Image: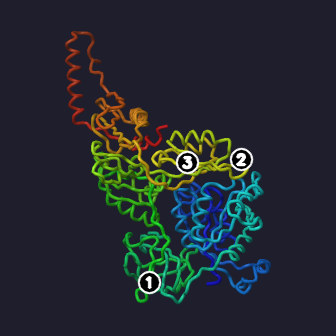
Amino acid sequence: MNNIRNFCIIAHIDHGKSTIADRLLEFTATVDKRQMENQVLDDMELEKERGITIKSHAIQMVYQPSVASRQLLSESLKQDADGPFILNLIDTPGHVDFSYEVSRSIAACEGALLIVDASQGVQAQTISNLYMALEHDLEIIPVMNKCDMESAMPDMVEDEIVELLGCKREEIIRASGKTGMGVEEILNAIVERVPAPQGDPKAPLQALIFDSVFNSFRGIIAYFKIVNGTMRKGDLVKFFNTGKEYDADEIGILKLDMQPMNELSAGNVGYIISGIKTSTEVKVGDTITHVERPCDKAIDGFEEVKPMVFAGVYPIEAEDYENLRASLEKLQLNDASLTFTPESSVALGFGFRCGFLGLLHMEIVQERLDREFDMDVITTVPNVSYRVFTKDGVMHEVHNPAGMPDPTLIDHVEEPYIRASIITTTNFIGPIMTLCLDKRGELIKQEYISGNRVEIYFDLPLGEIVIDFYDKLKSISKGYASFDYHPNGFRQSDLVKLDILLNGEQVDALSTLTHRANAVDFGRRMCEKLKELLPRQQFDIAIQAAIGAKIIARETVKQVRKDVLAKCYGGDVSRKRKLLEKQKRGKKRMKQIGNVEVPQKAFLAVLKLD
């Protein structure tokens, strides 16, 4: 156990985590030159296309320090320095929407590489992930990446890291994922500074599940870290929270591919295949133990995920409902932050109300459903969950505008607020403040970090930032502002339900909850947008926005008409009138039986109203 090190890599988006991971794998010869490619751990097509990490990936490296390195290692490690060190690396995502992945990786580690871009400095997600690591008492190794770039400001960024961590300057490693500079120093620092895992291989088995994937041939594969005890191939094990028992058909370690082993003891990270077919039986954060000699209690310190954004996901074909359920269950194994419950809609039939951590997360899930499971889905307008208090004092949690009680019964509504932290340069403070105040934000404080960089704290309603806040923030700050947030309770608010009616029929999938002050403007813009997107029919389509029974905006999509008078050259006016009346009757009958198809573009247009 003294030679095992478990560590993860944390950083803000685009600070070079995956590139540093590539260099570590290359240096330790974990991946041979044939298999080497950029972002080798990001095995999803989507990750390669977008250049972001979506899933955390675990891989084991074996590091044999060179003679020169061994002399540099401290006295306490000298006796272990000969044998090879087993380094279990968990690469993590950087985007705020995938912070749950990061929290799970951190729970399985004893140390973390904190990577900061030498040209951009400390950013919001750097701070947020760092605090998460410190809460779990992880040993932090600061690494300054991209030091080979011309735009790098190593001395200034070093000051920021020293101020943030309170470490010594000489503890910060200067590196470059592109050129491979500083990689050996990083490996030596991991060996020297990250503590070996604490645990007793002879104690009853306790293993924490931190991830799982679905394989159509082998069933569900769970990834775990053993805290205490030893697991052998063929053991009868049980999952603590679900109480289900299984045979460990295959256990092993995670290299680039899975590598079977006969036994794994405390401190190791590995996988288990036991022929589980039902996704509900594997819970991330659960504890694996032996049936014959079980542990007393499950491993704690694992938090449940709280979705921030909700949207309805419906199959385009009604008969695909069960396939969609199966696809979501398989996706949930691989992405524990996705939650879903069945719901139905008048306009769209049967589907699911899904909870996501943010808009990017929602987009990625939709894309993965399409690519990995070949599911075409319609996603409704995203919204957040509200608390509605009725006059009899009962509190209802509403995730869907269609679930709002009758307005006459409502006493008041509370909406969720977040505490946002925005890090930017001083020349963008004005536009960012204007943006936050337009979104009903409340300035809490601002602090200067170093030089011309400032951190601004705002309290904002979550419903206002769900749709387009992040995009606007990036565009007004030319990409320089970084944003991070955490929930900050509920507050009473004057919210109204805005309905969209097509020919007097309410389309529940387009209903939204919005602040009364924004309702008229929002309703008008929605009607104008729908007028552009709805295809013309043989009859007039009236598009109306309404609050309760009050219509606040209207647009009309004009009917497509055949020129029935084309064949009349002069003659009596009564002939023309007769033809027009006949057409009018036909149009009226058509309006009674015709229905308006709402295209998928119309549901998404609400997101892009500006």
State if disc 3 and disc 1 touch (CB < 8 Å): no
Quarter of the rendering containing residue 372:
bottom left
* Residue beneath disc 2: 452
**Residue 115 seen:** yes
Q: Which mark is residue 216?
A: none
Q: Marks 2 and 3, Cα distance to the nearest angstrom?
A: 19 Å
Tell me which label, 2 or 1, sits earlier in the chain.
1
Mark closer to the chain start, 1 or 3:
1
Viewer-nearest of discs 2 and 3:
3
Q: Which residue is mark 1?
A: 296
200 vs 24: above or below: below
Identified at 33% across, 37% down, the residue is: 547
Residue 576 place in picture, x, y as percent: 23, 15
- Lateral position of residue 553 relative to residue 56, left or right: left
253 above or below 568? below
The residue pinned by badge 3 equals 458
Whole-percent x and y of residue 380? Answer: 39, 47
- Compared with 585, 331 (above or below) is below
Q: Give the residue type that dot 1 points to.
A: Asp
